[in-house]
Amino acid sequence: MAVDMKGLKEFVKLAKDSGASELVYETKTMKLKVNFGGSSVVMHSAPAVQHAPAPVSPSVAAAPVAAKAAVVDANIHVVKSPFVGTFYASPGPGKPIYAKVGDKVKVGQALCVLEAMKIMNEIDADAAGEIVEICVENESLVEFGQALFKIRRA
């Protein structure tokens, strides 16, 4: 089993620094579980069943973004982060950003990139409409379930 230890260490450090109490990472060939509350690290190299990319533990739930008192609008759809990573508004340095406030977007249109373990993952719009808010800053760390974009449905 070949493991990119440098990337794995960065991923574990990122989860720990973001306040996670536990990290679970699974691939087809290994399963890694780190409990930051104690000192346990469990790593299995037996094949694990993988139904979907395993999100980081729910204990890393969204940052207190909802701390603001806001009026709930039924026409507003929130695009949330599917995992912990670094948010990038454009596909690369010097390239135009994917989306800005006021842009009309379609379902499946790329909105940003989230980087996790040196892997760039495009995050697509899952609702059509107009972007009314970008909830995070470029190159900032986002957590599982954190709001990234607010879209007013068409």
Image (tube, rainbow, N blue to C red):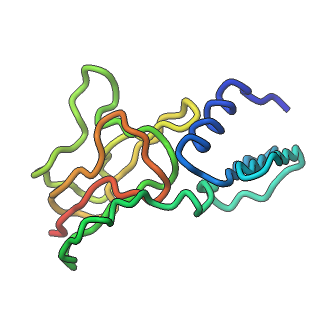
Instruction: Tell me: residue 50, above or below residue 43.
Output: below
- Determine which quarter of the picture holds residue 71: bottom left
Q: Quadrant of the C terminus?
A: bottom left
**Placement of the N terminus among the 4 image quadrants:** top right
* Residue found at x 89% / y 48%: 46
Q: Position of residue 29 (x, y in %)?
A: 81, 44
Residue 100: % across, % down: 17, 44
Q: Residue at x 68, y 54 (%)?
A: 22
In this rendering, position of residue 47 left or right of residue 118: right
Q: Position of residue 126 (x, y in %)?
A: 34, 62
Q: Residue at x 68, y 62 (%)?
A: 51
At which x and y percent is residue 31?
79, 48
The residue lying toward the viewer, choosing from 63 and 111, is 63
Tell me if 14 is positioned left or right of 82 in this view: right
Q: Is residue 28 above or below residue 68?
A: above
154 lies left or right of 20: left
Kindly indicate the quadrant of the structure image that contains residue 10: top right
Q: Is residue 15 above or below residue 77?
A: above
